[in-house]
Image: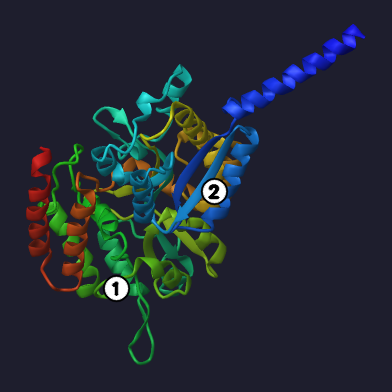
Amino acid sequence: MFDCLKRTLGASLLAGALALGFASGAWAKVELTMYYPVAVGGPLTKIVDGLVADFMKENPDIDVKAIYSGNYNDARIKALAALKSGKPAQLSVMFSIDIYELIEQDAIVAFDDIVETPEEKAWLKKFYPALMENGITGGKTWGIPFQRSTIVMYYNKDAFRDAGLDPEKPPATWGELAEMGKKLVKKDAANRVERWGVMIPSTGYPYWMFGALAMQNDQVLMNSAGNETFFDAPGTVGALEFWLDLGKTHKIMPQGTIEWGTLRQNFLEQKTAIMWHSTGNLTVVKKKAGFDFGVAMLPASKRRGTPTGGGNFYIFKQTTPEERKAAMKLIRFLTQPERTAEWSMKTGYLATRPDAYETPALMDYVSKFPPAAVARDQLKYATAELSTYQTGRVRKLLDDAIQAALTGAKSPNEALSAAQKQADRLLKRYR
């Protein structure tokens, strides 16, 4: 009877302790809110939801709520608005180029200040250096690559055959692009263009496409400190002149501006034989193209070149130590070699670390679908995406200059010189 009483008393005490523990929050879940942009590529919400669900199965003490936004700008605006409202998110995928604005607003915390173990510190060095360029400044890591891309050249192999071109030899230089493009243009009996040779989008992210052309002309757009731009450098002006000439002189591309949002459909509908676009479209093109297509590195002028692009993970400063640890756990989970390999295969985005391409699944995928390796191989020619202090305003200056030149409102030299003068005024106080 005494033993029975002890067992009953012990059970009561345990139940009371458990109740007290839950009431005090000792066993309460850590709740994370994550903002995520979904404007580019395939059915990203389902893929992200699946990855997050897998994480929560392995970590039942952490609850993750993903809030999806239209594009990178939307994600940044919503995340910063939440910070100001007093109901902040704990982490977000935002533009890699948002780094200076987020630091200036004291919105994010450096990963160097969160990592604790040697294993966590080693993890910071696991990513491709080219993808880290937009995440590191002042000797600290502020962003971790996840939804990352480069610009690649998609081309219609059937159109190449139709034009008498070798479908296995896409243009490797600017000269070849111009000459092949002329053969790829197809007109109807009334001399109306049915198929253009090439299309490069000049809305949405024109500065990004232009970063590729400038780099191919051996010119970067800004310095690594984010406080100086080179919009009026001879190489930059020459790059914009070539872009303009594709439509005006070579007549292989429509004159004026080309929409980012509809270009992929134009390619799928065979209205252009070549398009420059994000590797984030690779899986969608693979699924929907009703023709034989290829993917190649962008052509060279003085060298090959592309900016990296896409989003990084950031952790917000208004977080508790427990939330930061949970956010780190989630980010490390999503950037494991196997997970980033899965992400790459399902979306077309880059696997952000070399060892992901050594996983059996991605090795098999690349062997069966070689276009999946193009963006990875192009990283050795990649440079950081345009990112400066006052990045939104500086980027708009360049976007407006590009569009002014392509629409004939200004010459490339006039447009870029004016943009450089205004950028100098914005950035002078950061030098």
Q: Please determine whether, in this image, residue 277 is positioned above or below residue 338.
A: below
Q: Is residue 383 visible?
A: no
Q: Earlier in the sequence, mark 1 or mark 2?
A: 2
Q: Is residue 415 left or right of residue 297?
A: left
Q: Please determine whether, in this image, residue 336 is positioned above or below residue 117.
A: below
- The location of residue 144, given as percent across then percent down, is 40, 36
Q: Please determine whether, in this image, residue 34 is positioned above or below residue 205.
A: above
Q: Is residue 184 visible?
A: yes
Q: Residue furthest top?
A: 2
- Front residue of 307 and 401: 401
Which mark identifies residue 48? 2
- Front residue of 79 and 26: 26
- Please identify the quadrant where the N terminus is shown: top right
Residues at discs 1 and 2 in contact (Cβ within 8 Å): no
- The location of residue 35, given as percent across then percent down, is 44, 48
Residue sitting at 34 percent across and 60 percent down? Answer: 171
Residue sitting at 43 percent across and 30 percent down? Answer: 320
- The location of residue 44, given as percent across then percent down, is 52, 54
- SS at badge 2: helix
- The location of residue 323, given as percent across then percent down, is 47, 32
Which mark identifies residue 252? 1
